[in-house]
Amino acid sequence: MEFEHVTFDLPHGTFHALQGGDPDGQPTIVLHGFPDHPPTAAPFLAELGRRGRRVLAPWLRGYAPSPTEGPFDFASLTGDVLALIDRWSPGRPVELIGHDWGGAIVYDVSVTAPERIERAVTLAFPHPLTFLSRPRLAQLRRSWYMGLFQLPGSGWIVGARDLALIDRLWRQWSPGFSLDPALKAQLHEHLKASMPSPLEYYRGMLRPGMLAAARRLTQPIKVPLLQLHGADDECILPQRVDDRHRFAAPHAREIVPDVGHFPHIEAPEAIAERIAAWAR
C-alpha cells in the first residue's frame, strides 16, 4: 500500500506527514514517539489502511522536516494536532493513535477537545498522571535517560558516534528486535536534522506548562480509549495501578505478549488487528 508525503501549513509552520489507506475510510491520525518518526511505522500504517482507515502520520513538532523550533509544552503540542485535525478532517472526528510521547499527546487532546476524537489508542504509554504518581524503583532505573536529557550538552552526547545512544535505547527498549537497516539509516538522517529539539519534550516536563497539563489531565477522559503495552517493554513498565477513575468512557488496557516498547513496529499486523477488533 502506497503512502504519499504531504504537507500542511499550520499556525506553527509547515508540517509534513505520510498519508494513505482507504480514501473513504475512518480518518485515523498516528502520532509517533521518541526517538522515532513516521516511516518506521509504514507497515503498521498500511495494515490500518487495509482495515478501512484513511491514515495520516505527521512528523511532530521538533522532528524534521516539520518545524523544529519550540515551545514544547503540552498545550503547544496538542494545538498542533488539533490544527491538523481541523485541516485534514474538518467534518468528521478522527481515530487518534499515539505511541510514547505521541501517546502522551493523545491523552491531552482527549481531555482538551473530546468532540474531535471518535476514539483513541495509546501504545506503550499509561495515563501521564498514573505514570508520574507512583514511580517504582525499577521504572526509575529505566528512566535514566530523562535525567541525562536535562543536562547542558546532552544533545552532543546523543548525536555522538552516529547516534549510538539512540541505537542503544532501541535495543534496550525492545529486546530481540532490530530495525531494518534502511529504515534505521533514514531515521538517523531525520534525527540528526532535528537534534536537539526532540530532547526538549523531556526538558519541558520540568517547566510550568507541565503543571497546566497536569491540571487538565485530572479531568476524566470522555473518549473511548484503548491502552496497549508490550509485555517486554524495557522503557516504560506496564502499570500496576488501578486508574479506572481517570476514564469516563469505554476503556480497555491490554498487555501484548512478545513485543517491547515499539509494538506497532515489531508486530504491525497484530497491533492493527487488535485496534480494529476493539473498534468493532
Image (spheres, rainbow, N blue to C red):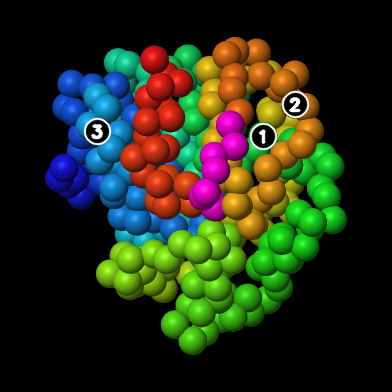
Which amino acid type corresponds to the residue marked 3 in the rendered image? Gly
Q: Earlier in the sequence, mark 3 or mark 2?
A: 3
Please state which of the two labelled residues, at mark 2 or mark 1, is closer to the viewer: 2
The circle drawn on residue 127 is 1
What mark, if any, has residue 243 been given in the picture? 2
Q: Secondary structure at mark 2?
A: loop
- Marks 3/1 in contact by CB < 8 Å: the verdict is no
Horizontal side of 19 relative to 215 (left or right) equals left
Per the rendered image, the range of residues in magenta is 254-261
Residue 255 falls left or right of residue 195 = right
Q: Amino acid at mark 2?
A: Asp
Q: Residues within 10 Å of mark 2 (few under 14, many from 20)?
A: few
Residue lying at 75% horizontally and 19% vertically, measured from the top left: 245
Answer whether residue 256 is magenta in the image: yes
Count residues near mark 3 (Cα–Cα under 10 Å), then give few for <14, some for 14-19, many for 20+: many
Q: Is residue 234 visible?
A: yes
Residue closest to the eye, 125 or 79: 125
